[in-house]
Image: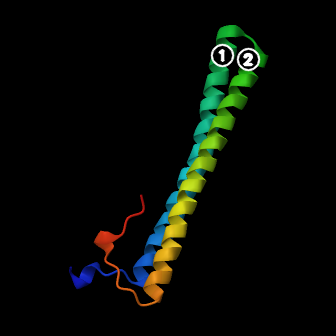
Amino acid sequence: MDNNDIVDRESVAQVRAIMLVSSRRVVISAVAIGTLAGLVASTLVYWLTGSSAKATVMLVAFVLIGFWQAIRWRRHYRGIFKRLDDLDRRVSSGEVIYGSQTRFH
């Protein structure tokens, strides 16, 4: 193994910062896309059927799907952050860890 491949605390902190930005974008996007899709679907349903009740049901369904996806992505990223915490503890204790041997999936 190459010495450039050794994980240090600075690289863990950089990965954590990148993952924090990425996780926020994904979770917010899940909610926004669900809401936007709900608006489009409910508008289409209202335009085709003229029923505001059906349009409202479509809107609520898509918004709930968006929130469910946000919850799932949040859990996914929480698992990654837990693994990063574990990696940080191992590096802090002096263990030599190579980046090529580290996996998060």
- Residue 93 at x, y percent in the picture: 46, 89
Residue on which disc 2 sits: 54
Quarter of the image for residue 14 reads bottom left
Marked residue nearer the N-terminal end (2 or 1): 1
Characterize the local packing of mark 1: few (<14), some (14-19) or many (20 or more) Cα atoms within 10 angstroms: many
Q: Nearer the viewer, residue 59 or 93?
A: 93
- Residue 48 at x, y percent in the picture: 64, 10
- Residue 43 at x, y percent in the picture: 66, 21
Q: Is residue 30 above or below residue 92?
A: above
Look at the image and tell me whether residue 61 can be seen.
yes
**Label 2's element?**
helix
Residue on which disc 1 sits: 45
Left or right: residue 34 versus residue 85 is right
Pointer 2 with pointer 1, Cβ within 8 A: yes
Q: Nearer the viewer, residue 91 or 44?
A: 91
Quadrant for the C terminus in the image: bottom left
- In the rendered image, the residue lying farthest to the right is 53
- In the rendered image, the residue lying farthest to the bottom is 94
Give the amino acid at mark 2: Lys
- Residue 26 at x, y percent in the picture: 53, 51
Characterize the local packing of mark 2: few (<14), some (14-19) or many (20 or more) Cα atoms within 10 angstroms: some
- In the rendered image, the residue lying farthest to the left is 1
Residue drawn at 40 percent across, 78 percent down: 11
Query: How does the figure colour the protein chain or chains?
Result: rainbow
Look at the image and tell me whether residue 13 can be seen.
no
Residue 15's tag is none
Give the amino acid at mark 1: Val
Residue drawn at 64 percent across, 30 percent down: 38
